[in-house]
Image: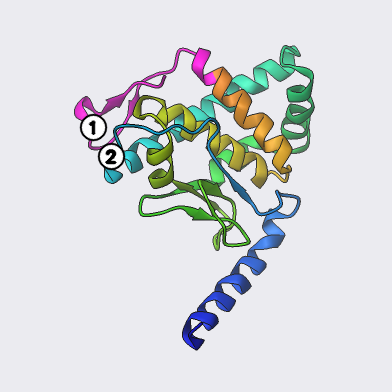
Amino acid sequence: MPKSTLIAVITLLSCFAQALPFREGGVSGGGGNVLNPQNPKIILDSEKAEHIVRASKLYAHIFFANAEEEYLKGTAPADVMAVYKKIFENNNVTEVLDTVHPHVRDYGPCYDYSLNPVDASVASLEPDRFCVSSYALSHKVLPESLPIQAAALMAHEYTEVMGLGETEAVIIQKQALNDLQQLALPPLEVEGCENNNVEGK
């Protein structure tokens, strides 16, 4: 390995290590992937996929609002309720959603703390950002499923930011997929799309 490349890798790992205190209690590796990946016959244009994923943050917010209602009513499954308890009683979810934002990457995957390629990751040099790869999602998700899959993946990452582990983050991701598929979601206002609207499905 060339000396310059080795220095760059060491520097990057050092920066990730400095970001770890903010992520304390998060997953091993810090990354997440879409659930039930598929092989779409149509790969969206990278810019269009980026805009859709960025707009899908709205659905992640809708999921957490709906999840809090389910938690207060006690209507979610037991394993989900256990995770909701940690989110809604021990963390200020509103503050996290308002201050931590997805950085949408359209030119390759995200990387976890071990530099493994993943679809999304909390491994970030900025404490108020996590990575979501629209490039990876557009190659693994049917175009019509992209908004909900992206939102569920964001919910996974927000859960990690709140300090929960991988198993709990996946529980939230699965619940987000389930809930968002059943909710009457508003069309997304997506830059660059015809009529600027994309239906969540």
Q: Report the amino acid beneath label 2.
A: Lys
Contact (Cβ within 8 Å) of mark 2 with mark 1? yes
Q: Is residue 182 magenta?
A: yes
Q: Tell me which residue sits at (27%, 37%) in the image.
A: 191
Query: Can you give x and y, in whole percent of width and height, for residue 83 in the image?
Result: 75, 30
Q: Which residue is mark 2?
A: 48
Asked whether, in this view, residue 90 is left or right of residue 57, the answer is right
Q: Label 2 vs label 1: CA separation?
A: 7 Å
Q: Tell me which residue sits at (48%, 31%) in the image.
A: 149
Which corner quadrant of the image does residue 136 belong to?
A: top left
Q: Report the amino acid beneath label 1.
A: Cys
Q: Residue furthest left?
A: 194
Q: How many marks?
A: 2
Q: Residues within 10 Å of mark 2 (few under 14, many from 20)?
A: some
Query: Can you give x and y, in whole percent of width and height, for residue 174 in the image?
Result: 61, 27
Depth order, front residue of 137/79: 137
- Residue interval drawn in magenta: 180-201
Q: Is residue 6 above or below residue 188?
A: below
Depth order, front residue of 155/7: 7
Q: Which residue is mark 1?
A: 193
Query: Can you give x and y, in whole percent of width and height, for residue 75 in the image?
Result: 72, 11
Which corner quadrant of the image does residue 82 belong to?
A: top right
